[in-house]
Amino acid sequence: MKKAVIITLGGIAVLFALIYAFIYFVTFSDGIRTGELIKISHKGMLVKTWEGEISQGISGAQIFSFSVLDKDQEVIEKLQEYQGQYVKLNYIERYATFFWLGDTKYFVTNVEQEESPHFRK
């Protein structure tokens, strides 16, 4: 009886580890998006995550929501610096996420300041 419980709990732990590894390390897609950075915040009650949004339209008609992992401190600092400016985001899309990683499936890996196409000379 004791052996069956240990094997069952071990199997559940291994299954969870495989699911976590798949979600964390296997990406669905990657890409680049540009737009005006309208929000970057550190939010959550139990677990705080970094969440942001860029506006990809003139009137904010298309909003791209994204998350940033806590380990990417350089990206977080740049996003805070570029608040309200036009930026280019490199991101990866995962199949799913866990609540302690972020609210969205899109995770920003790099950010650069861009010149807005609306105000070019």
Image: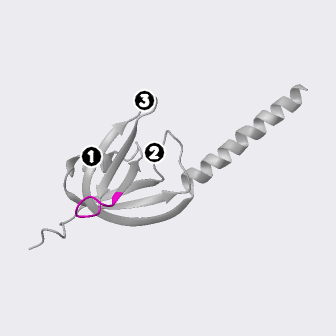
**Sooner in the amino-acid sequence: mark 2 or mark 1:** 1
Q: Amino acid at mark 2?
A: Asp
**Residue at horizontal 61 percent and vertical 53 percent from the top:** 22
Residue 81 place in picture, x, y as percent: 20, 48
**What number is the disc on residue 114?**
none
Left or right of residue 83, residue 25 in this image: right
Image coordinates for residue 25, horizontal then vertical, percent = 56, 54
Q: Main secondary structure of the magenta part?
A: loop
SS for callout 2: loop
Kindly identify the residue that appears in the image at 83 percent across and 35 percent down.
Answer: 7
Three-letter code, disc 3: Met
Q: Where does residue 111 sit, x and y in percent of width and height? A: 30, 58
**SS at badge 1:** helix
Q: Earlier in the sequence, mark 3 or mark 2?
A: 3
Work out whether residue 69 or residue 84 is closer to the camera in this orientation and state it: 84
**Quarter of the rendering containing residue 12:** top right
**Quadrant showing the N terminus:** top right
- Apparent side of residue 43 relative to residue 35 in the rendered image (left or right): right
Please tell me whether residue 41 is drawn above or below residue 32 in the rendered image.
above
Identify the amino acid type marked 1: Glu
Determine the CA span between mark 2 and mark 1: 19 Å
Magenta highlight range: 56-63
Mark 2 lies on residue: 103
- In the image, which is nearer the foreground, mark 3 or mark 1? 3
Q: Residue at x 37, y 36 (%)?
A: 43
Secondary structure type for disc 3: loop
The mark found on residue 77 in the picture is: 1
Among the two numbered marks 3 and 1 on one chain, the one whose residue lies closer to the N terminus: 3
Q: Which residue is label 3 attached to? A: 45
- Among all residues in the image, which is located at the extreme bottom? 121
Q: Is residue 58 magenta?
A: yes
